[in-house]
Amino acid sequence: MNFLIKSSATRQISLAVTMGISLLLLPVHAGAAAGIVPNQPAVESTTKKIAIVIDDFGNNMDGTTEMLELPIPFTVAVMPFLPSTKQDAQLAHEKGHEVILHLPMEPVRGKKSWLGPGAITTDLSDDEIHKRIVTAIEDVPYAIGINNHMGSKATADERVMNILVDICKERNLILLDSRTSPKSLIGKLASQKGVPYSENQLFFDDLYTYSHISKQMVKFKKLVKDRDLVIAIGHVGPPGKKTAQVIKEAIPTLQKEATFVPISQTVKLNVK
């Protein structure tokens, strides 16, 4: 099964179990402005880049502490309107991590109630979609961009994605396509409109077992050997502590191959 589709379906099921919540971008590092840069030992190669994004912050999820203690730059994707939304964004910023809005969007399969508050669905009017996106951006401090939470249906809807991309252009935000659907239009529209964007290439924890996450890390390491840039997504929540441990164990090996970077250093941009 295509891992993108499997990831979307699995996360939707997880969200139902975890009350509907659990289960890229701007060229300036949010932490750099504050003079805070996560520690990273020198690496042998500086030409290859690794960007890791951790989704689902904002609801006091398992693994939050473990993720924020990782000694590498990574990007923190925070869901809006949840109990620890502002706290998680503030702490991530203080630790020198880039913050993006993890915007809930409608999936092909699943209940809207799984998405959490303020979700973007295809039945909404243009004005309501615009209002919800802007309100969500303003609810997540230090957000330099947006990625989609679920969204296999919404990201394939041209009307909805045009509104999202236009807002990002107006507000100088970057976009990360989580790639929960191969039909996503984020990259196409962002490229057409001159909005910086990146695309996820692998989910670490579409299944929650340590064994599966470890196997995904093996795939990730192979991608790093084969490509100059690799972007992957993990999660806090049910798999959070396991994913954090697998990443932590892999850091020394990965740093011999590439440099960990924030998502803003991965973007593609067609200047308009």
Image (spheres, helix red, strand yellow):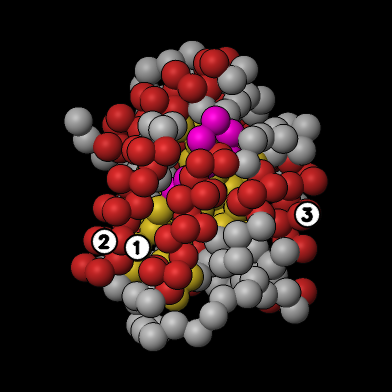
Residue 219 x %, y %:
27, 53
> What amino acid is at disc 3?
Gln
Pointer 3 local density, CA inside 10 Å: few below 14, some 14–19, many at least 20: some
Label 1, label 2: how far apart the Cα atoms are: 7 Å
Q: How many marks?
A: 3
Mark 2 and 3 residues: CB-CB less than 8 Å, in contact?
Answer: no
Q: Which residue is mark 3?
A: 90
Q: Amino acid at mark 2?
A: Leu
Q: Quadrant of residue 220?
A: bottom left
For label 2, count other residues whose C-alpha is less than 10 Å away and answer few (under 14), some (14-19) or many (20+).
some
Reading the image, the residue beneath label 2 is 223
The residue identified by callout 1 is 230
Mark closest to the chain's N terminus, 2 or 3: 3
Q: Residue at 72% of width from left, 35% of height from top?
A: 60
Q: Residues within 10 Å of mark 1 (few under 14, many from 20)?
A: many
Identify the magenta region: 233-239
Asked if one can make out residue 219 in the rendered structure from this viewpoint, the answer is yes
Q: Given this view, does label 2 or label 3 mark the residue nearer the observer?
A: 2
Marks 1 and 2 close (CB-CB < 8 Å): yes
The amino acid type found where label 1 is placed reads Val
| Residue 41 placement (x, y as % from top left) | 54, 80
Left of 58 or right of it: where is 127?
Answer: left
Q: Quadrant of residue 197?
A: bottom left
